[in-house]
Image: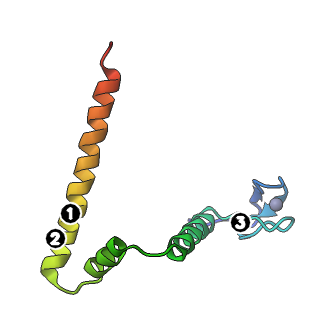
Amino acid sequence: MMVTSSIQRKCPQCNTWNTEGEINCKSCGTTLDVSTKLKEDHEARERKRIALPKTKFDHFVDRIAKSNNPFIKVAYVFIKTVWFIYWVILSIFLWMVAATPG
Ligand SMILES: [Zn+2]
């Protein structure tokens, strides 16, 4: 998608109008680009997560995720899928309970 330099973008923080393409607000420095903002948020979360001391379970998951053993990789994907399906079923169940009158 092409963007022209005539398009302005409003800063969500201080309401200053910035030229499209500016990554940070020229007034307060707030990140304007949504994808950059999301990336920064994600990185901040990652840093926070890394700062936390790892549990034995985290190490275990890390080892599995980084494993080169194809069987372990398949098992890892399988467990993640089962976990996801479990949550879907659980949320459907909760929704049904909530939707049942009385
Ligand atoms: Zn600003």
**Relative to 39, residue 17 above or below:** above
Dot 2 falls on a residue whose secondary structure is helix
Say whether residue 85 is left or right of residue 53: left
Which residue occupies 29% across, 81% down? 63
Dot 1 falls on a residue whose secondary structure is helix
Residue 67, percent across and down?
Answer: 24, 84
Labels 2 & 3 near each other (Cβ < 8 A): no
Residue at numbered disc 2: 75
**Relative to 85, residue 61 above or below:** below
Say whether residue 25 is left or right of residue 73: right
Dot 3 falls on a residue whose secondary structure is loop
Q: Quadrant of the N terminus?
A: bottom right
Labels 3 & 1 near each other (Cβ < 8 A): no
Residue 22, percent across and down?
Answer: 74, 70
Disc 2 residue type?
Ala
Which residue occupies 55% across, 67% down? 45
State the mark number for residue 31: 3
Label 2 – label 3 distance at C-alpha: 40 Å
Quarter assignment of residue 21: bottom right
Q: Give neighbour class at mark 2: few <14, some 14-19, many 20+ (Cα, 10 Å).
A: few
Q: Does mark 3's beta carbon lie closer than 8 Å to ligand 1? A: no
Residue 85, percent across and down?
Answer: 23, 50
Label 1 – label 2 distance at C-alpha: 6 Å
Disc 1 residue type?
Ile
Residue at numbered disc 1: 79
Q: Earlier in the sequence, mark 3 or mark 1?
A: 3
Q: Give neighbour class at mark 3: few <14, some 14-19, many 20+ (Cα, 10 Å).
A: some
Say whether residue 94 is left or right of residue 4: left
